[in-house]
Each structure stands twice: as structure tokens, then as C-alpha cells.
């Protein structure tokens, strides 16, 4: 299709149009689901761009172009899960390499690092990423990767992406960042110096809690080629139906994120004033230690927050069980509000003392604020808190 280059357009327009030209043969407006494994060749070795769907599939290509455009990157790669994407970055390393990462990285990331890649003799330093000096101090001769996440789960700690990627750059180390919580609508790490951006598309980009998928985006052609080699060799690639579902989600990412942010801010401020709530962790609140950096590197503060009920583990369990609009469930980023208690759920694998030392108290509650009516969300939390503490 001729027309203005989508990279010159704003993100709301690119979300809908990038990589999604109408089908040339039929004029179909929506990306066709190419449910197909192999492709006809006109002569041996003469294919029309596709040979086999693990290597490439047209529906996946449309998604990969869309995701690259959203992150402001050249090259996108889609995977069958966020973990599949993370694993592909790890495939770049060799035995004997060292990785610097955050002490509060996503649980699945912590697991693949310590229970899979440590077995392959890759070493990890888990540090407080909010402190650039700690990041710098953790670098060694054999460090090959800096793995960032911001905001983090569940305390919404903020890492200075530009500062951290400068450190990686000075050491000639790849800087990868998991941008799942913020999404490219709110934060574009490639512009801030990161080398590769990772996503669990399962969350906000898919946005409807109906698909598991992942992605990597980079501006570096050599890096993309290496990632593509592992994407094809390892084979954690998404099917065309999943790609279609994610594309359906990315079209509305900007409008959904606006409402997620608005509702999260409303809920955070309301909780902050509540007598039975000790602390609220939301980067949009001025009291949040990462507020200033978040205000600089994010366009808004996202839909995730946590709060500490002034009460026991049992009372917090009652709270999360009593909500009616918020659903008690793990995961995040869908249109519906979810609530969970890290201690017995997402962070149950961490021994209690270690967990509490990391700030994950018994009364901590995490919410993924959905796009329902904000007043309904507050009314629901109000009745659940009342039931829990009285
Ligand atoms: C969910 C999640 C992942 C893992 O993604 P899957 O799609 O579940 O494999 C990685 N990082 C973050 C921050 C996540 O929330």
C-alpha cells in the first residue's frame, strides 16, 4: 500500500494501522488468519517470502511489524509466551557469562534465571535496580547482559532506564528491558538507550485475558538476526490465531491504557486516604520513591498498583475474597480488574522472612485496575475492606 509511512504517525494511529494494510488479494480489511504450516515454491528454493510457519507466517509478520512500530523499533519478533521471548534473549549468552538484574524481577524470570540458566553455568547478580551505583558495582569482566524491569512487581519500583542503559553501554553489555507493565504507549525504552525490549503480550498488549504470547523488539539489525536465529531454532513461536488476537488487542491499546491509568490514579488516591490502608505503591503518587523518574520516563503511570492493608494475612485474604467487581486471580493487563495477595499467591515461593525483608508484607494486596467505571471499583474495594477489617 502506498501512503504515509506509518513510522511518522502517532502511536494511536500506528496501533491501528502499522503492519496492517488490507489484504492485497481480497481487500480484507482485517489481517487474515493464515492457518497454514507450509508454502508453495515456484521452483526449488524459489518461495514467495515464506517457507514454513515456524520460520515465518504472514499473520505473525503483521503482528511483528505492528509491535516494532509501537516500540519505535525496526525489528519485531513474536513468541508463544513472554517466557519464550525472555528465553530467546538468554540464548544469546554462553556458559561462563554473567547477568546483572533486579532483586524483584518477575517470578517466571527469576525462575528461568536461577533454575534453568544457572544450570548452564550462567551467573546472576540480583541487585536493587533503583540504585544506579548498585547496578554499576555489580558489573564484572564477564557480564554480558543487563536485564531491567520497570515498574516492578508488586511494589512498582522505578528503574532509571536511561541511567541504567548508559552503564550497560559503557561496559559494552546488552541492555534488555521487560516493558510489560508500562507498555509502549507509556514508555519506549529503545528511545532511552535500551538495546532490546521484551513483552508478555499476554498482559496489556493482548489486553483481554484471552491469549498467551510474547515479543522482542530491537533497532539493531545484527541483534535481531541473532534473535531470529534462536526464534526459529528453539521454536517458541505463536500460531496465527494468537497473533490475530494480539493484533485485535493492540488496536485499542491507547484508549484502554488511558482508562487503566485514569482508574488506577482514582483508586490509588482513594486508597491513600483510607484509614485501614498503611501504604499505597503507585508511581503516580508523589509519595512514591520513584515518582520523579517515572514522571520523566513514562507518559502516564499505568494500571498496576499495590497497597498494604493495616491488618493480618487472614484479613488481607478476606479482602481479596470479598470483592465482587475485582476478580481474585493472578495475571494482569486485561480490561477486567483483578486482585491478588502476593504472599500466598504470586510470591508464595519466597520464604516468609525473605519476602517480608523485600517489603512484601502479609497484608500486601496487588491490583490490576481494569477499565470498568472507577466509582464502581472504589465502592467494591470499600465494601471488601469493611468486611475484612470489621
Ligand atoms: C507475565 C509476565 C511475563 C511472562 O509472560 P508469559 O506471557 O506469562 O510467558 C514476563 N514478565 C512480566 C513482567 C510479566 O508480567
Image: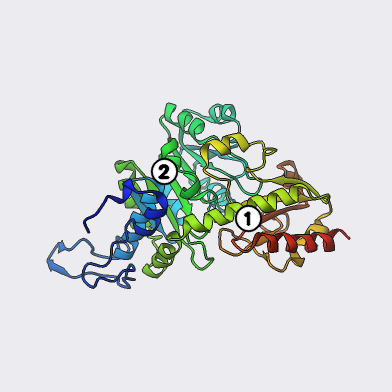
- The residue that appears at 38% across and 54% down in the rendered structure is 13
Quadrant in the picture for residue 37: bottom left
Q: CA distance from mark 2 to mark 1?
A: 30 Å
Image x and y of residue 274, in percent: 80, 50
Local crowd size for mark 2, using a 10 Å CA cut-off: few (<14), some (14–19), many (≥20): many
Q: Would you place residue 390 above or below residue 241 in this image? A: above
Q: Would you place residue 130 above or below residue 41 in this image? A: above
Q: Is residue 351 among what the camera can see? A: no
* Disc on res. 263: 1
- The residue that appears at 56% across and 58% down in the rendered structure is 333
Q: Secondary structure at mark 1?
A: helix
- The residue that appears at 43% across and 35% down in the rendered structure is 193
Q: Would you place residue 329 above or below residue 309 in this image? A: below
In this image, 303 relative to 279: left or right?
Answer: left
Mark 2 or mark 1: whose residue is earlier in sequence: 2
Q: Secondary structure at mark 2?
A: strand
Where is mark 2, residue-wise?
Answer: 196
Along the line of sight, which residue is nearer the eye, 91 or 185? Answer: 185
Quadrant of the frame with the N terminus: bottom left
Quadrant of the frame with the C terminus: bottom right
Image x and y of residue 375, in percent: 69, 60
Q: Is residue 292 among what the camera can see? A: yes
Along the line of sight, which residue is nearer the eye, 11 or 290? Answer: 11
In this image, 167 relative to 47: left or right?
Answer: right
Q: Would you place residue 57 above or below residue 265 in this image? A: below
Image x and y of residue 306, in percent: 69, 50
* Disc on res. 26: none
Amino acid at each position: 500500500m502506498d501512503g504515509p509511512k506509518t513510522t511518522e504517525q502517532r502511536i494511536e494511529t500506528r496501533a491501528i494501522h502499522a503492519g496492517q494494510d488490507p489484504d492485497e488479494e481480497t481487500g480484507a480489511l482485517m489481517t487474515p488468519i493464515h492457518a497454514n504450516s507450509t508454502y508453495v515454491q515456484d521452483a526449488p528454493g524459489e518461495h514467495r517470502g515464506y517457507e514454513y510457519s515456524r520460520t515465518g507466517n504472514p499473520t505473525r509478520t503483521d503482528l511483528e511489524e505492528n509491535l516494532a512500530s509501537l516500540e519505535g523499533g525496526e525489528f519485531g519478533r513474536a513468541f508463544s509466551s513472554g517466557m519464550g521471548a525472555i528465553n530467546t534473549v538468554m540464548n544469546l549468552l554462553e556458559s561462563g557469562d554473567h547477568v546483572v538484574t533486579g532483586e524483584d524481577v518477575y517470578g517466571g524470570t527469576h525462575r528461568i534465571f536461577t533454575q534453568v540458566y544457572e544450570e548452564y553455568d550462567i551467573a546472576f547478580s540480583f541487585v536493587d535496580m533503583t540504585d544506579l551505583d548498585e547496578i554499576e558495582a555489580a558489573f564484572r569482566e564477564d557480564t554480558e547482559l543487563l536485564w531491567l524491569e520497570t515498574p516492578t512487581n508488586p511494589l512498582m519500583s522505578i528503574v532509571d532506564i536511561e541511567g541504567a542503559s548508559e552503564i550497560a553501554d559503557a561496559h559494552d553489555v546488552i541492555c534488555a528491558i521487560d516493558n510489560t507493565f508500562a507498555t509502549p504507549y507509556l514508555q519506549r525504552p529503545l528511545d532511552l538507550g535500551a538495546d532490546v525490549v521484551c513483552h508478555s503480550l499476554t498482559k496489556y498488549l493482548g489486553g483481554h485475558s484471552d491469549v498467551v504470547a510474547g515479543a522482542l523488539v530491537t533497532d539493531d539489525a545484527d541483534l535481531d538476526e541473532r534473535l531470529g536465529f534462536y526464534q526459529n531454532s528453539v521454536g517458541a513461536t505463536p500460531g496465527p490465531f494468537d497473533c490475530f488476537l494480539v493484533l485485535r488487542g493492540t488496536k485499542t491499546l491507547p484508549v484502554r491504557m488511558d482508562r487503566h491509568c485514569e482508574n488506577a490514579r482514582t483508586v490509588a488516591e482513594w486508597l491513600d486516604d483510607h484509614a485501614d490502608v498503611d501504604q499505597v505503591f503507585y508511581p503516580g503518587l508523589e509519595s512514591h520513591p520513584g515518582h520523579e523518574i517515572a514522571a520523566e520516563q513514562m507518559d502516564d503511570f499505568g494500571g498496576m498498583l499495590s497497597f498494604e492493608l493495616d491488618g493480618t494475612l487472614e484479613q488481607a485474604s478476606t479482602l481479596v475474597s470479598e470483592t465482587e467487581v475485582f476478580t481474585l486471580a493472578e495475571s494482569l493487563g486485561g480490561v477486567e480488574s483483578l486482585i491478588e495477595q502476593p504472599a500466598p499467591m504470586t510470591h508464595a515461593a519466597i520464604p516468609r522472612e525473605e519476602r517480608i525483608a523485600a517489603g512484601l508484607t502479609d497484608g500486601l494486596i496487588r491490583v490490576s485496575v481494569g477499565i470498568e467505571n472507577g466509582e464502581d471499583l472504589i465502592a467494591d474495594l470499600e465494601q471488601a475492606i469493611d468486611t475484612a477489617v470489621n
